[in-house]
C-alpha cells in the first residue's frame, strides 16, 4: 500500500470515529437553550480572557510543521470551573444509535426553540447537527 495513502487514512480515522464515540457536555436540568448558550459563551469568554492562547510552532520528522496551544488545558479547567459555578455538571453522553439516531437526526434539522428546557436522562444521546455541532436528544 502506498505510504502516503496509508498515512492519509490513519490521519482521517479520528475524524471518521469522532461522531461515534461518547462526548462530554455541560448539562443542567431545566435550563433553557437561551440560558445555556449565554452561560457557555460567557464562560468561554471568561476562560479565554483569564488564560489567553499561547501558540507554539515546531517541526517534527514525518509530521512537518505543527502548532500547539500550551494554555488549552488550563483554559479548559477555567471553563469547567465557571460552568460548575453556574450549576452545570460535565457528563459523557453517547452518540445516538438505532431508532434514536433517526429521531435525533430529524430533531436536529428543526429550528432551535430558544425557550425549550434541557432534559437529560440515561437515554439521552447526541448527533451532529446541520451546522456540524453536536445536538443533544432525549427520547
Image: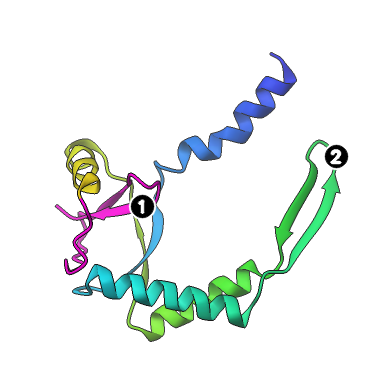
- Which marked residue is nearer to the observer: mark 2 or mark 1? 1
- Identify the coloring: rainbow
Rounded to the nearest whole Å, what is the CA distance between mark 2 and mark 1? 35 Å
Q: Which residue lies furthest to the left in this view?
A: 139
Q: Position of residue 81 (x, y in %)?
A: 47, 81
Disc 2 or 1, which lies upstream in sequence? 2
Relative height, residue 111 to residue 44 (above, below): above
State the residue position of label 2: 61
Q: Residue 120: image x %, image y %? A: 22, 64
Residue plotted at (68% across, 28% down): 7
- On the image, the x and y values in percent for residue 31 come to 23, 74
* Residue at screen point 54% across, 75% down: 77
Query: Which residue corresponds to mark 1?
Result: 134
- Which residue lies at the image location 85% right of the left edge and 39% below the top edge? 61
Which residue is nearer to you in this view: 52 or 82?
Answer: 52
Q: Is the magenta stretch mostly helix, strand or loop?
A: loop
x and y percent of residue 17 in the render?
47, 38
Q: Residues within 10 Å of mark 1 (few under 14, many from 20)?
A: some
- Specify whether 34 is left or right of 14: left
Q: In which quarter of the image is residue 8?
A: top right
Q: Indicate whether residue 45 is drawn in magenta.
A: no
Drawn side of residue 104 relative to residue 86, left or right: left
* Side (left or right) of 97 relative to 78: left
Give the image quarter of residue 103: top left
Mark 1 element type:
strand
The residue range painted magenta reads 111-139
Amino acid at each position: 500500500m502506498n505510504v502516503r495513502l496509508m498515512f492519509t487514512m490513519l490521519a482521517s480515522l479520528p475524524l471518521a470515529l469522532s461522531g461515534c464515540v461518547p462526548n462530554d457536555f455541560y448539562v443542567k436540568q431545566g435550563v433553557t437553550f437561551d440560558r445555556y448558550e449565554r452561560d457557555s459563551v460567557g464562560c468561554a469568554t471568561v476562560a479565554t480572557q483569564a488564560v489567553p492562547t499561547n501558540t507554539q510552532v515546531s517541526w517534527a520528522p514525518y509530521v512537518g510543521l505543527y502548532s500547539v496551544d500550551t494554555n488549552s488545558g488550563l483554559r479548559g479547567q477555567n471553563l469547567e470551573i465557571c460552568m460548575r459555578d453556574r450549576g452545570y455538571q460535565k457528563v459523557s453522553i453517547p452518540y445516538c444509535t438505532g431508532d434514536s439516531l433517526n429521531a435525533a437526526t430529524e430533531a436536529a434539522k428543526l429550528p432551535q426553540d430558544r425557550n425549550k428546557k434541557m432534559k437529560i436522562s440515561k437515554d439521552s444521546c447526541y448527533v451532529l447537527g446541520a451546522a456540524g455541532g453536536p445536538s443533544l436528544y432525549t427520547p
